Image (cartoon, rainbow, N blue to C red):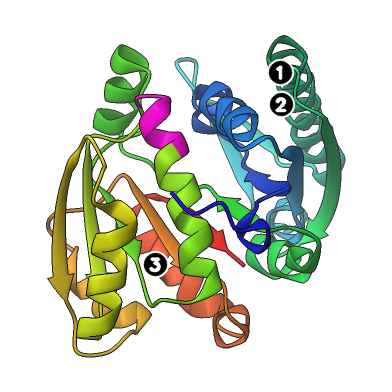
Amino acid sequence: MTNDIENKIDHILVSLRLDSYSMLIMRQIVVLAEKLNANLCGMFVEDSDLLRIANLPFSREVIFPAANVRKLDSAAMLRHIRSHAEKLRQMMAEYARLSNVACSFRTAEGSVIDEVLGESNDFQLIILMPEKYSSRRKMQVENTGQLINPVVLFYDGSSQAKKSVRVIHSLIENNNLQYLKVLTTHADNELSARQYLKLLSVKVDFIHIDHYSINDIVSMFSTDKPGLMILPLEKKLMEQGREIKYLLDALSCVLLLVR
């Protein structure tokens, strides 16, 4: 494992969502920060589109089993959202205290991807949660305490890719990684990746792809969806908010962006 100081990860940003899955894997995220000896910042984005929809005159909410119908109210929706955000903040703070991890929490309003990428300059690792996560995967995480395998890493020989190796080792130390798929576009990058990853105690497969694109990656894993994907956060990727959202929606996996 490389010890170069420039490959160190000091600050992690995790984008938390309005669902139970964010709470479900909070512990793993805090432990990852502990293993990397990094500060952790939780970010909760109040979805402005959701609040606008709540104000539309035709919006309704059906309450089962009595099937009572009531108008959606943006003020009530905002209270619900902020109540959930507070629960996430308290949970993160408690886990961080137990693991001796420095943590902070912030909220924003707008588009999740845009807000997160806009904050990315201050962090070496960005964790994005999928908006939709299957009940099967939730059950697996609940039963095993692990992030769902396989983990997919795109390795291009960049400094971001070398930082990703630190994340890989930390996931293995925490028993969150059992099967790794490494994507490369060049033979030299594969040789470099093999050198950095040769001592791993997990199964590793190397896969050659002709060129790097979000669409190609989504097509490759459309039927065999990964549990977690690690990608380098380059300038071109920062400008691809729509593609990143497409990847999250299509693969429903946790996405780690390393910069």
Considering depth in this image, is 192 or 238 the residue closer to the camera? 192
Considering depth in this image, is 153 or 7 the residue closer to the camera? 7
Considering depth in this image, is 167 or 52 the residue closer to the camera? 167
Q: Give the labeled residue for mark 3.
A: 247
Q: Residue at x 31, y 70 (%)?
A: 192
Crowding near the residue tagged with mark 2, few <14, some 14–19, many ≥20 C-alpha atoms within 10 Å: many
Give the mark nearest the N terminus, 3 or 2: 2
| Secondary-structure class at tag 2 | helix
Q: Amino acid at mark 1?
A: Met
Q: Are marks 3 and 1 in contact (CB under 8 Å)?
A: no
Q: Amino acid at mark 3?
A: Leu
| Secondary-structure class at tag 1 | helix
Q: Is residue 41 above or below residue 98?
A: below
| Secondary-structure class at tag 3 | helix
Q: Give the labeled residue for mark 2.
A: 88
Q: Which mark is residue 91?
A: 1
| Range shown magenta | 170-175
In whole angstroms, how far apart are the C-alphas of marks 2 and 1? 5 Å
Lateral position of residue 14 relative to residue 183, left or right:
right
Residue 154 colored in magenta in the image: no
Q: Main secondary structure of the magenta part?
A: helix
Q: Residue at x 42, y 58 (%)?
A: 230
Quadrant hosting residue 146 = top left
Q: Are marks 2 and 1 in contact (CB under 8 Å)?
A: yes
In whole angstroms, how far apart are the C-alphas of marks 3 and 2? 25 Å
Tell me if I can see residue 110 in this picture: yes
x and y percent of residue 15 in the render?
65, 48
Lateral position of residue 145 relative to residue 7, left or right:
left
Q: How many marks?
A: 3
